[in-house]
Amino acid sequence: MKIISADLADQAFTVAQIPSFDLPQIAVFGRSNVGKSSLLGAMMGRRKLVRVSSTPGKTRGIFFYRVNEELLLVDLPGYGFSKAPKSEAGKWKSLVEAYLDSPSGPALALRLIDIRHPPTRDDLTVGTILSERGIPFIVVATKADKLSRARRLEAVAAIARTLQVPPQRVVPASVKDPSIPIEAVWDSLLPLLPGNPEAPQGD
Ligand SMILES: Nc1nc2c(ncn2[C@@H]2O[C@H](COP(=O)(O)OP(=O)(O)OP(=O)(O)O)[C@@H](O)[C@H]2O)c(=O)[nH]1
Ligand SMILES: [Mg+2]
């Protein structure tokens, strides 16, 4: 994906602030600190545009980044932050579910899983939230630079098993190791976008 332009189009901290767009949206799900904001910055080639947290749990709102006047990448707040109070989980659910059910909710989701750790119960819940709404997804195994090449393949296979998806749907990614190209994430998601001739047709 050649990035011609990328900018922060809007942000929402409350249900009332959730915007609506005519462009397809790709929403990024994952535990706090899994690398959502970093991945989006790398995918856009604009590290400074995206707020990356030094303290986990910092991305509290929903951030909408417009890419090439073609699509939006949507940075969601992280879930499952163990130090966050219980009320945070309720807030996450109401904001994110309102977004998913909004008139221009996401056409596609990226589910981020740290390549070093098995998916959590919350990671599995995301699968339910998406399938209830018929939102397709790909899985991105983040921080792949933390494992050797051989361990990476094992980890991808284990994540695929736990999430019950084919291993080809799990893309290893790193924002630190250029030998693991971020382009692979674009290559796997673009065919699933509506309007793409390669996208699966509904029946
Ligand atoms: N080694 C390595 N570190 C990474 C990678 N991606 C992100 N990180 C680090 O992981 C930490 C969290 O990254 P973020 O992008 O802020 O994670 P997030 O999922 O947006 O976190 P929240 O906004 O809190 O939900 C930061 O210290 C990043 O530098 C990666 O590919 N490799
Ligand atoms: Mg973030």
Image (cartoon, rainbow, N blue to C red):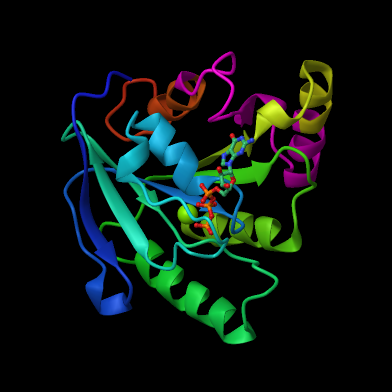
Number of numbered discs: 0
Residue 116 % position (x, y): 77, 40
Mark yes or no: residue 103 visible: no
Residue 186 % position (x, y): 43, 25
Toward which corner of the image does residue 166 lie, by quadrant?
Answer: top right
Residue 165 % position (x, y): 69, 37
Toward which corner of the image does residue 26 lie, by quadrant?
Answer: top left
Q: Residue furthest top?
A: 179
Residue found 25% across the figure and 78% down from its top: 16
Mark yes or no: residue 190 visible: yes
Residue found 78% across the figure and 22% down from its top: 153
Residue in the foreground of this view, choosing between 90 and 60:
60
State which quarter of the image contains the N terminus: top left
Toward which corner of the image does residue 11 lie, by quadrant?
Answer: bottom left
190 falls in the magenta region: no
Residue found 65% across the figure and 62% down from its top: 125
Residue in the foreground of this view, choosing between 74 and 202:
74
Q: Residue furthest front?
A: 54
Q: Is residue 11 above or below residue 153?
A: below
Q: Is residue 34 left or right of residue 74?
A: right
* Magenta stretch, residue numbers: 156-183
Q: Is residue 153 above or below residue 195?
A: above
178 falls in the magenta region: yes
Residue 173 % position (x, y): 59, 29
State which quarter of the image contains the C terminus: top left
Residue found 77% across the figure and 17% down from its top: 149
Q: Is residue 177 above or below residue 61?
A: above
